[in-house]
Amino acid sequence: MAITREEVLHIARLARLALTEDEVSLFTEQLGKILDYMAKLNELDVADVEPTAHAIEMTNVLREDVVTNGDQREEILSNAPDRSGDCFRVPRILED
């Protein structure tokens, strides 16, 4: 199933995306391939396939809640490579 350049531009406009001409060409091709693949999947007979939410049967493994002392500030800060009082010191990443 082919998708047109105009459809890609329409989708981009709805998503508030500004695309270059190269991106429009690339996305037209990529979306066309995705739609072709979806068309192949739609041809499959899944009438006898049970719907699933996950391919593998899984059960949540939860642990019991245990109340602990939450005041571990010194223990946590002892792992910091650099600190100032009760705060971690990190390298500056923003300019003034």
Image (cartoon, grey):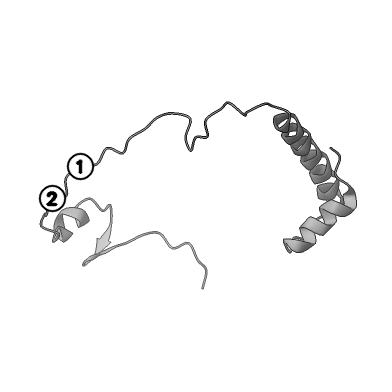
Which quadrant is home to the N terminus?
top right
Residue 51 position in % (x across, y down): 52, 34
Quadrant assignment, res 30: top right
Q: Residues within 10 Å of mark 1 (few under 14, many from 20)?
A: few
What secondary structure is found at the residue carrying circle 2? Answer: loop
User: Looking at numbered disc 1 in the image, what kind of residue is underneath it?
Assistant: Arg
Specify whether residue 3 is in view.
yes
Q: Is residue 62 above or below residue 72?
A: above
Indicate left or right for 51 with 76 as reference: right
What secondary structure is found at the residue carrying circle 1? Answer: loop
Q: Is residue 30 above or below residue 6?
A: above
Residue 69 position in % (x across, y down): 10, 57
What residue did someone put label 2 on?
Answer: 66
Indicate left or right for 41 with 10 as reference: left
Residue 74 position in % (x across, y down): 15, 58
Which residue: 16% across, 49% down? 65
Query: Do tag 2 and tag 1 residues touch (Cβ < 8 Å)?
Result: yes
Which residue: 14% across, 57% down? 72
Q: Residues within 10 Å of mark 2 (few under 14, many from 20)?
A: few
Quadrant assignment, res 33: top right
Q: Nearer the viewer, residue 88 or 55?
A: 55
Which residue: 89% across, 49% down? 5
User: Looking at numbered disc 2 in the image, what kind of residue is underneath it?
Assistant: Val
Q: CA distance from mark 2 to mark 1?
A: 9 Å
For this orientation, the residue located farthest to the bottom is 96
Indicate left or right for 52 with 60 as reference: right
- The dot on residue 14 is none
Q: Is residue 34 above or below residue 74?
A: above
What residue did someone put label 1 on?
Answer: 63
Residue 47 position in % (x across, y down): 62, 29
